[in-house]
Image (tube, rainbow, N blue to C red):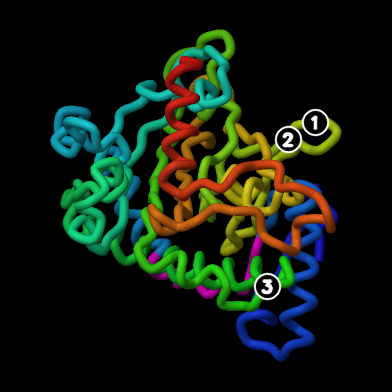
Amino acid sequence: MTDAHSEIPAIDIAPFLNGDEADKRAVAEAVAKACREIGFLVISGHGLPKEALDTAISKGFDFFDLSSEVKSKWHPTGTARQRGYHRVATRSLASTIGEKTPPDLRESVFLGPVDDHRTHYAHLPEAETAYAANIVPDEPAGFDSALVDLYRGFERLSLDMLRIFAVALDLPESHFQPLMTRHFSIFGMHHYPVLEADAEPGQLRAGAHTDFGAMTILAMTEGKGGLEAKTPDGRWAPVLPKPGDLVVNLGDMMERWTNDRWVSTLHRVVVPETGDAQSRRMSIGFFVHPNFDADIRCIPSCLEDGAAPRHPDITAGGHIRMKIDASHKAA
């Protein structure tokens, strides 16, 4: 199931989604191995509609071609940091692991949950930012609906991946489903423009970091200066999905859930040569965060007899807040 040209396991998940119990177990075992060993996998047979992805990418390139003045109409104000448009070099992902580097060379559009759960969490003021209203660009025409459609597609796929994860962890297939009824997953469309000037020392398109949530599902266009994952022996391996394939990587929450049995891996997006026209690329990530009040406690199958969990119980919202606070202190 692994592509001979890549160090990242490649797995067809269609037999799990469409097959019998033996098929499901085979896929789940392959996924479990990838999650233990590197925390990254490339998936095919995922069912994410190609038309929805192609439309969003095409309109996304058109959006990022607009002037900075126009794009900034959708920049958020206040505390809703992961909503709307964010221009190039305004964030530094390496700061989340305590590194001080120049800001990342990418621009982004973020969406939060499409369903409105603010009333449900009105009694939890700390949940306000997680469920903040979206700021969705409506230029070019149809871009807003394309983003929402693709969010829904990733949302469905995340539930399928959690079914696979459950079986891989010797849990009932539906184990994670009740924890996703009011999720606060983040959708990010990231544009990496051609570099017009040399990067500063230590500057990357996206600095080395781990993701905070349960997992991330990524779609990306081809282009020089792409994604790399850190291998267990400390090397940086390029992540090169075939056309139509998606990348899945674990986040810190899943590592915590599995008592560190599964790994949340450092990854980065490297800088191409200045002026290389083939380096323009797009990456779309769906960062899976369960219900804000979901319990993140050690999964029983990941705990040896007589051993204590490595991490105390926490809620999903508390975990994300802890990671954000730690990154702010490091910065």
Q: How far across and down, in percent of the image, does residue 11 sit?
A: 72, 66
Residue 97 to residue 155: above or below: above
Left or right: residue 325 versus residue 278 is left
Q: Amino acid at mark 1?
A: Arg
Residue 329 to residue 253: above or below: above
What range is drawn magenta here?
Answer: 43-52
Left or right: residue 110 versus residue 27 is left
Q: How far across and down, in percent of the image, does residue 138 sit?
A: 16, 52
Q: Nearer the viewer, residue 242 or 166?
A: 166
Q: How far across and down, in percent of the image, does residue 290 sit?
A: 45, 57
Labelled pair 1, 3 in contact (Cβ < 8 Å): no
CA distance for labels 3 and 2: 29 Å
Q: Residue furthest front?
A: 306
Left or right: residue 78 versus residue 306 is left
Q: Please tell me which residue is depicted at 57% across the width and 72% down the height of the picture.
A: 175
Q: Comparing marks 3 and 2, which lies closer to the viewer? A: 3
Q: Secondary structure at mark 3?
A: loop
CA distance for labels 1 and 2: 6 Å
Q: Secondary structure at mark 1?
A: loop
Instruction: Mark 2: give few (<14), some (14-19) or many (20+) Cα within 10 Å.
Output: some
Find disc 1 in the rendering and name its residue.
Answer: 235
Find disc 3 in the rendering and name its residue.
Answer: 171
The answer to whether residue 249 of the structure is visible from this angle is no
Q: Earlier in the sequence, mark 1 or mark 2?
A: 2
CA distance for labels 1 and 3: 33 Å
